[in-house]
Amino acid sequence: MVLGTVLLKTEIPGPRSRELMAARQAHVPRGPFHVTPIFVKSAKGALIEDVDGNWLIDFASGIGVNNVGHCDEAVVAAVQAQAAEFMHLAFNVTPYESYIELCKRLNEMTPGDFPKKTFLANSGAEAVENAVKLARAYTKKQAIVCFDHAFHGRTYMAMTLTSKAKPYKAGFGPLNPEVHRAPFPYPYRWSGNAYTEDQDTVDEQCFAEFKDLVLNRITPYDCAAVIVEPVLGEGGFIPMSKGFAAKLRAFCTEHKIVLIADEIQSGFGRTGALFACDQLGLVPDLMTTAKGLGGGMPISAVTGRAEIMDATGEGGIGGTFGGSPLSCAAALAVCDTFKKGEILERARHVGAQVQETLIAWQKKHAAIGNVRGLGTMMGFELVKDRKTKEPWPEAAKQLTKFCYENGLIIMTAGTYGNVVRLLMPLVIKDEELKQGFDILERSFATLRMTRQSF
């Protein structure tokens, strides 16, 4: 095929994908969800080939994982070279140099001019679990504060920290104790003391509620940590403001509370900077990373102040597969790519085009109530009526279906399921980006509603 073009040989999903879906339904439990019914044969850059020979443009990146693109040559070469040496030994049994080197790199790359250490795990949820353990061990306190619309994973503590009940928490109780939730500054849907979409006013009111929660309903003497996503991921791509970040940092410092930044989805160039915290001027005590760190391989990390990272006894954190040799090799290749700097320039270029396109669409399509995000981590919220802001999740599903049937993979998000989020690889070519947007804009013609025409 010609790179940069969609090539559809069959209807989507094709016959082989339908055959495999039938096998999936027979042998795999219904719990794992699927954005599309498409089975993949290969992928390169920002393009995916399915098992029926169709080529599609990817605006999802495996949920923000393939920031450096599918099958990046440096990542593939690093994994192949490591596989020829050894694939598994367990760092807890016979340690290896690549684990240490990756920790050193992350200590250097993450925000904060103080001694740091890093612990490697397998998934974002596992990183969150260990960050909470470290904060509790260090402070000798128990309470954890999280925020509305947050997503931190599906394991028990991470699931408890996650805001949305269905499908993430429904039926899985009892949840973990000593988890408290504060409002996140979400101007488009803020309904505080005085309804407003003004960011500064919303920040002020949210922070007042946060302070009341910690000072009066928990007390700082019992509060171990505050965990926050600098840009909400599953919650709908809502960025935190610099002002709110500064207030949060100052409060946690004053009251000796560990501030954890969850950059699992926003990290490694996704927002146009290496980390969203860099754009916000936020220096957390602990940072969790995953997704884009491994370039497609499963790996996660907790990086932070050395004294906090050393708070557990020997054996207090660890795991059989955490920081596997293959994943460390891939992550080191990813770090090398970002060290060169060109990919961040590309991310900012792509992000500017995405923002310009979505803002133009908002003026054109009445179904788009709000556009927001940072860099290439952008999304738009679909509503039935701009005045009432009634969420329109059915429209988000309809756009998703039209897009994959016509050669583009997108994803939805948001507490109300009405946000279309864009997570294209940072290395996507201009022609691929343009064609993807052409397909996505065409999808608006499929929307039908009695109260409005689009």
Image (tube, helix red, strand yellow):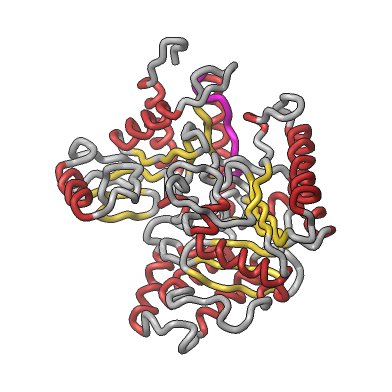
**Based on the displayed image, in which of its 4 quarters is residue 235 positioned?**
top right
Of residues 165 and 442, which is closer to you in this image? 165
Q: Nearer the viewer, residue 164 or 283?
A: 164
Residue 360, x across and y down, in percent? 55, 26
Q: Report if residue 310 lies within the magenta region.
A: no
Residue 291, horizontal then vertical, whole percent: 48, 58
Q: Residue at the location (30% across, 40% down)?
A: 6
x 43%, y 65%: residue? 298
Q: Identify the residue at horizontal 48%, vertical 51% (top origin).
A: 173
Q: Residue, x 76% and y 50% (percent of image)?
A: 214
Outermost residue toward the bottom in this view: 94
Viewer-proximal residue, 304 or 161? Answer: 161
Quarter of image, res 185: top right
Query: What residue span does the magenta drawing correspond to?
Result: 365-376
Judge from the rendering whether residue 77 lies leftward or rightward of residue 382; answer left or right.
left
Instruction: Answer whether residue 368 is magenta in the image.
Output: yes
Q: Nearer the viewer, residue 260 or 180?
A: 180
Residue 230 lies, in percent from the top left, at 64, 49
